[in-house]
Image (spheres, rainbow, N blue to C red):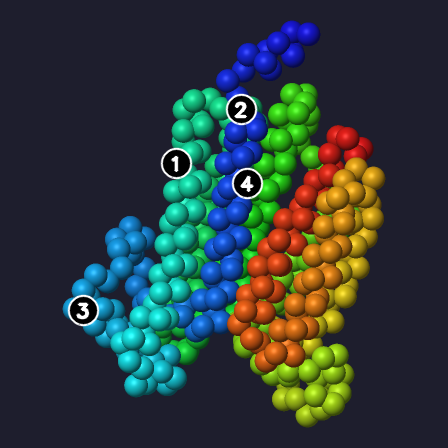
Amino acid sequence: MLQASAAFLSPARPRAVARWLILVAALIVVMVVVGGITRLTNSGLSITQWKPVTGIVPPLNDAQWQAEFANYKRIPEYRQINAGMTLAGFKAIFFWEYLHRALGRVIGLAFALPLVWFAIRRRIPAGYGWRLTALLALGGLQGAIGWWMVASGLAVRTDVSHVRLAVHLLTALTILAGIVWTALDLLALHRDRSAAPARLRAPALAALALLFVQLLYGAFTAGLDAGYAFASWPLMGDALFPAGVPMADPAWRNAIDNPLVVQFIHRWFAFAAAAGLTWLAVRAWQGAPRTALIVVALVVVQMLLGIATLLSGVQIDLAVAHQGNAALLLIATVCAAHALGSNRAR
């Protein structure tokens, strides 16, 4: 009785904190979509400097635009691929990279400022402050990772490192998963002040691991432009795997650096990931049938979008939908994993 009264009198407001986190998660999904457009339009190297504070102000006059364009003309991508690009063409690619970076700043402020306010007002429930601080720190690291990725394409290469691109994307998705999981814990705490945080059980961990690998190969596929290699499915041309493909030495490098091998793995590992996610949905059905159905539905949509993206020759709208749906699938998977690991499920 005393415990219930203390919980009622506490200034902590788990539902308000959870709603704020859900809003931030929605912004991250938008960020993932804009990041996909930035990659697909080859816009990511249009801004060649990292100015975390002053970079929020775009060029405002012709002299500033000419200065930005001059910076771009110094890098290999312009000299080897876009030589002769007009200022209007540069502005088009600059827009997406600028929007991507601006969204990053907005998300940072949308997380940091309310976090400080909730902390000062003592609205954060006991035991959650460290988790939210860790997510904030990971978000700051993500900004540095983004520049580390861009820097890989400014000196020698004509694009960014696909490995660094994968680190950048997977860090964003890890932050997204952590935010969603924390929001679900807080909503459970709002419904029952004695509720403990959910545990990550083995079936959920296995499903998330399979999804992680598939997302990793999706990032490799995007970074290597591997999706353009064969616009056919289920065969790659006339064979399951094309003959005469040049292979790297040592052999393990092909699974990371060879576009044809990467596309092949991404195509077929999808079925392993789909099986794991379906099994998670089955296990979560009793406690969260709606979430389980959403997971299965998004798996089907994701596979269809992947096939359609290949067959279209990586049409931008389909490829962006494929990446955006991947973020939604991750959210649904986290929700199913949370339901499986909640007190109610146990």
Q: Secondary structure at mark 1?
A: helix
Q: Residue at x 54, y 35 (%)?
A: 19
The residue tagged 2 is 13
Q: Residue at x 70, y 66 (%)?
A: 303
Horizontal side, residue 19 vs residue 284: left or right: left
Dot 2 or dot 1, earlier in sequence: 2
Amino acid type indicated by mark 2: Arg
Amino acid type indicated by mark 4: Ile
Label 1 vs label 3, nearer the camera: 3
| Distance from the alpha carbon under mark 2 to that under mark 3 | 50 Å
The image position of residue 41, as x and y in percent, is 45, 72
Q: Residue at x 54, y 69 (%)?
A: 317
Q: Indicate which disc residue 62 carries.
A: 3
Dot 4 or dot 1, earlier in sequence: 4
Q: Indicate which disc residue 22 carries.
A: 4
Amino acid type indicated by mark 3: Asp
Q: Quadrant of the C terminus?
A: top right
